[in-house]
Image (cartoon, helix red, strand yellow):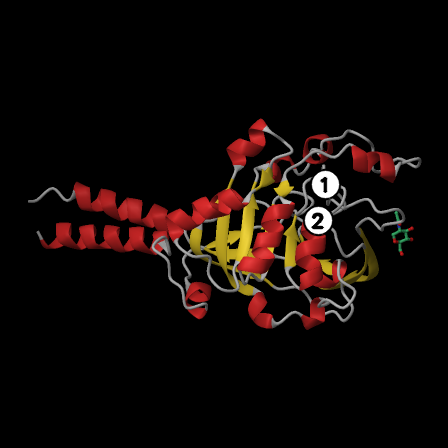
Amino acid sequence: MRDNSHIVLVAFVLIIVRVEAGLVDLSHTLDENANNWPIKGFKRFNHTDLKVYDQDGAYFIAKDIAMTEHIGTHMDAPHHFGKSAWDLASIPIENFVVPVVKINVREKCAENRDYVLTVQDLEEWEEKFGEVPENAVVLMETGWGDKYSDTEAYYGTGRDIKADDFDYDAWMTELHFPGFSAELSLALLQDYNIAGVGIDTASIDAGANAQFQAHFTLEANNKYGLENLCCLDKVPESGATLMAIPPKMTGGSGFTLRVLVDTDSTFAYKQSGKITSGASQTVKVYGILSFICLLLFVM
Ligand SMILES: *[C@@H]1O[C@H](CO)[C@@H](O)[C@H](O)[C@H]1NC(C)=O
């Protein structure tokens, strides 16, 4: 009898690849520890029982909730920085299911916590993967998602946000975390047709940029911002589809939401009419492995 152990091995690898592919959750858990930009008077996440019934095996619960719009993993609607820019209810739905352009600058950010994403970083992505697809979301991976629950490491200042005498203006001068450069924000607006940008820090602008140039450039011109993302290391640099679907809230300047990436799906790339060379790496790997498996089987 033939030794079939190599087939089993390849099949095993195939199963692992399969399990690692698929949906990735880019959202932090929403609870009372959620990060929240500390604008004076902001409401922390407050989830209270409104009605509870728990008797004779029958159960019912409904809760009340109070929080700011910009809590935890959330979308900044363009209206956040533009008076007549789209509120949540006005963003076209095709902007919620979009091709992913992910730029990994973890190492640069580890060396310099004020690192800003440059036009050159984007051009390097394009050299590898081709043109930025229409209606893409540009994700900046800084590695800051891992620091989310450590306020000092996340914002770059140990000042206590929860203190009664919290000084917002002083806090603003102490922030140090990476973000999108003003120059790249302008290029993304003028030379590309993106749906929005996203980052695994508290703000699309770097902490040291007190002028909020990325916000004013992009959001005021109908590009959304995804902030406090997590797990960007699990997202392919190209070829995946991101889904970020906020509530259809009239007047909303932003909202916490679930952000998912389908690493297998080139759906949004196809919609945008551009499948780049780097598209759908997972599907390719899966296809090649399946082929090897088949070969071994028929041999
Ligand atoms: C949370 O909400 C409840 C119910 O509205 C309220 O009684 C309580 O004071 C709130 N807690 C905080 C910390 O705001």
Is 157 in front, or is 126? 126
Q: Which residue is painted at 60% across and 29% down in the image?
A: 112
Q: Secondary structure at mark 1?
A: loop
Give coordinates of residue 54: x percent, y percent: 77, 60
The residue at which mark 2 appears reads as 213
Position of residue 30 measured from the top left corner of the image (x, y, whole percent): 70, 50
Considering depth in this image, is 261 or 52 the residue closer to the camera? 261
Residue 65 vertical placement versus 4 (above, below):
below
The amino acid type, in three-letter code, at marker 1 is Asn
Q: Amino acid at mark 2?
A: Gln
Q: Residue 120: x, y in percent?
A: 50, 43
Please state if 71 lies on the left or on the right of 9 as rendered.
right
Residue 221 vs residue 163: left or right?
left
Q: What residue is at 89 percent from the left and 36 percent from the top?
A: 167
Circle 1: is it few (<14), some (14-19), or many (20+) Cα within 10 Å? Answer: many
Rendering coords of residue 76 (x, y %) = 70, 57
Q: Nearer the viewer, residue 126 or 227?
A: 126
The total of numbered circles placed on residues is 2
Instruction: Establish whether ligand 1 lies closer than 8 Å to the Cβ of label 2.
Output: no
Residue 191 vs residue 212: left or right?
A: left
Q: Is residue 234 above or below residue 53?
A: above
In which quadrant will I find the N terminus? top left
The numbered dot on residue 209 is: 1
Marks 1 and 2 close (CB-CB < 8 Å) = yes
Residue 229, visible in the rendered structure: no
